[in-house]
Image: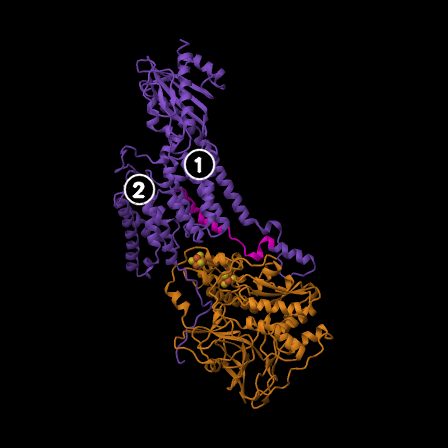
Chain colours: A purple, B orange
Amino acid sequence: MEKLLNISSGPHVRDRWSTRFIMLIVSASLMPAAVLGIAFHGIHSLFVILASVASAVGTEFIFDKITHRPDTWKDGSAIVTGLLLALTLSPNSKLYLPILGSVFAILVVKCFFGGLGRNFLNPALAARCFLLISFGSDMTDFSVKNGVDAVSSATPTADLLAGKAVNVTRMFLGNTNGIIGTSVIALLIGGLFLWAMDIIHGQICFSVLIGFALFVGLFGGQGFDPRFILAHICGGGVVMGAFFMATDYTTSPVSKLGQLIYGILIGVLGGLFRLFGSAADSFSYSIIIANLFTPLIDMYIIPKPFAYRRKAIEARQALAEAGIESRTEEKKTFLGRIPKPVIALAVITLVSGLALSGVYTMTKDTIDEQKRIAKAMSYKAVCPGAEEFEFPGEVEAWITENGGAVYGTDFGRCYINEAVIGKDAAGDTAGYVVSVTTADGNDGNISLSVGVDEDGVVNGIAFTELNETPGMGMLCGEPAFMGQFEGAAVDRFELLKGGGADEEYEIDAISGSTVTSSAVVNAVNAGLDFINNVMKGGE
Amino acid sequence: MNGSFRGGVHPPDMKSLSRDLPLQEFLAKGDMVFPLSQHIGKPAKAVVKKNDPVLAGQLIAEADGFVSANVYSSCSGKVKAVEKHRTISGQMLECIIIENDGEYTQADTYDTRRDVDGMTVEEITAAVKDAGIVGLGGAGFPTHVKLMPKDSAAIRYVIVNGAECEPYITCNDQLMRSNADEIVEGTAIVLELFPNAEAVIAIEDNKPEAVAAMQQAVTKARNARISVRALHTKYPQGGERSLITAIAGIDFPVASLPADVGCIVDNVGTVYAIQRAVVYGEPLFKHVMTLTGEAVSHPGNYIIRDGTCVAELVEASGGVSDQLKKVLAGGPMMGFALTSLDVPVVKTTNAITMLAADPVEEAEKEMTACLHCGRCTTVCPQGLLPQMMADASEINDLDRYENKLYGLDCIACGSCTYICPAKRPLTQIFKQTKAEILAIKRAAAGGK
Ligand code: SF4
Ligand code: SF4
């Protein structure tokens, strides 16, 4: 009994969860993405991850030793930062990138600002942005080194923005060009796990996704087509950002309402940058910008204790009216009772609304311009000999009159949008191009341009709008299908549903997607018919 | 209403150490020590002096004013001294020390029933006041004050608190199992004071035996104004405010009293004491208490006399293991750590918890900077922002602490400290900051 008893103020029990435990769980939740990343992109990804984690932890260790701080490197947060950074890098990254990035993240973004819980930017993201700015080309080298088609270096998001067909299923799995942590399914598993464990706040991750989806749906030009929106969500680090970056504790607001606003802000900014900005990997920037808003949000949105919220006050007033005297009810006017958060909210909404509409008007012309360029590029693709295109007056007149009606009788629901004559450098006719839209696609409209040369040989087709089922109808956009049209000197193609095409005019349908295939063939036929009967017939 | 409060935590309840051990009486042989202040309010005034002979149940100190409480001797013997002695809070306070003759001769047998039905409201409250009853669940607020709100007609709920949400403690569980009828009678007596109220006996659902026993007693008493409610097991369910939120569905600022929102909350032990006082005229000098913890050889639930030396009880119960690290008066969430075992049990001591491991010591090793994880906010039953409060306190921004963050509304329940993965001593900071702010206010008021 003669022994010193421990003295301290209560409570005298503690939950088992510690900082380190949480960090380890977060790291564990990133493992599926890391493992799939290595599986899809090769062993070099593993080295990138290891280099990043090791230098993150090492930097903090050295900083602790030099500044004689307590051993904060043990708390596991550096592991998370290192992992997150690595997963946002290209699998081709030279090892100096993860090392430099981690040192920057830990030393500059975290330690210089006071360490864990004090940094105002997300360290991994800030480091990624730093690398993007400093080593842009190395950072965006996504070319496939060991794959079969060693040519393509564009990420699906870049393709998506260029109006090209993308394969959402592959994006979902992560088997595409892109960062190491590109597997949406793996990130989702990890993220939902963290959410279920109550480690990340649903208010943040889901509002990011919803904000982004709404924005892309409203301004993406394709309406709320789930496939289009999903393709956007699956690419460009949106899922990684929503679940692992935006939810970073230190750089997100404290209150639930604040978290909602912050999440939506990220989603909207992300959508804005994605659709109207220049870089496909702009999602990082939206989070970094929202990080900067966090202190502001926290300053204005301070939830009141339960007893001071309107509901409780009203309940007590009701009691008071029922005859109970209440001693401490503060008599505040309606305005005096609620303003701060509401005003802040109103201001934030107003400002972002204004900013958005401003940006939209500013970029609207560019969008039209971009669409025009996309169309011009498709014309060029199907009429390679042409230097410029001429929109003949009589064709224009024909379209003004008949363009709104279904073209012909045996092409399904096809509409002619535009038809031009390609002229070569000498001003001679190089070919004809027709832009056709068919409403018979499995999932809405399909638009394409058909090009024919002077001699009636089909140069090829190019899609300007294609939103078919990924992995099925979407395959129409692949060379294997499109290529069948090239070089055929015919004025009508025929679709073979069973395969085995050997004549010029025969086209093999994509198995399982005969609806899409036949819509495409009909559209091409409509285009050819238009060239032969309206354009040339008019001569 | 909605049956629960928001927030809260689930610490391991550790009640299995003692939950099924029936109450046993403990009669100490050594000196008994009675602090003059065992309650909130002014200390009582001693009415005995050195060498006076005393009997068990004899008044030895008298309430000084309205918010104060009488103190009775729990043993027979003679007054040894009236002097400062160490108490449970660690302070040296004025105490009456009685040399115990071990006979426990009582001033009265306290076994003849009085005619309760004929008693007026004044008689009932007077009996409670005379008996020196204070709130046994918590801070020891004099019960007669609580029973006399400004407008007793406005009281809608009398909540009898049998939640016992603190880990380890089981004495009220046992009391409800063995004395359910008396508790129901006590409840009926309290209801006499409040014509428009209904009584709810609130028990956490981890005590099914107590719920059943109380239910049975209520059915037997055929009093339509009394009901039993099993509540969700969650700390701090037994906090006055959490109970009111759960049962009356109302939140109110700390500056208000439960009576302001039409509620009176009394612990089951208090209600039992009221029954003893009103029906039998027995003053409060014994109550139930749990001796528990991993370091105690034989945990148990006791009917303990006020003034009993903790060390003597522990010794008599079979001693402690040499693993002993920490001793708490009360449970681990809200209890005090004792500096010494040579302190007397007082009216409000509902448990002595002897820990073989000190989680605080272990937590200190794992302490990190705040992660901003928001767990503290999620669990705070008051809806406060502990993380921001701690930051404000750290930079000594007391204005923000008090007015922006409503820091004075913290009830020091400990949930935030319990849950914090960074192991920050949040509640501890809040207790200190509150004391600081109140001291400044007092100084300002005094300076005028
Ligand atoms: S101790 Fe205070 S701040 Fe912490 S949870 Fe309890 S009431 Fe909230
Ligand atoms: S629980 Fe602890 S670490 Fe988390 S926000 Fe609150 S104080 Fe910070």
- Which segment did they paint magenta? A285-311
How many other residues sit within 10 Å of disc 1, few (<14), some (14-19) or many (≥20)? some
Report the residue at 40% width, 34% height from top.
Answer: A470
Report the side of B115 relative to B350 (left or right): right
Q: Amino acid at mark 1?
A: Ile
Percent position (x, y) of residue A209? 45, 42
Q: Look at the picture and state if A16 lies above or below A218.
A: below
* Residue B148 can be seen in this image: no
Picture quarter with the N terminus of chain B: bottom right
Query: Who is closer to the viewer here, B68 or A112?
Result: B68
Front-lying residue, A476 or A213: A476
User: Is residue A290 in the magenta section?
Assistant: yes
Left or right of B429: which side holds B288? right
Pinpoint residue A258: horizontal percent, then vertical percent.
49, 49
Q: Main secondary structure of the magenta part?
A: helix
Q: Which residue in the protein does label 2 denote?
A: A40
What residue do we see at 38% from left, 62% from top? B367
Residue B407 drawn at (x, y percent):
52, 60
Between A473 and B136, the one lying in front of the other is: A473
- Say which residue label 1 marks: A229
Which residue in the rendered view is the most extreme toward the top? Answer: A539
Quarter holding residue A319:
bottom right
Q: Which mark is residue B90?
A: none
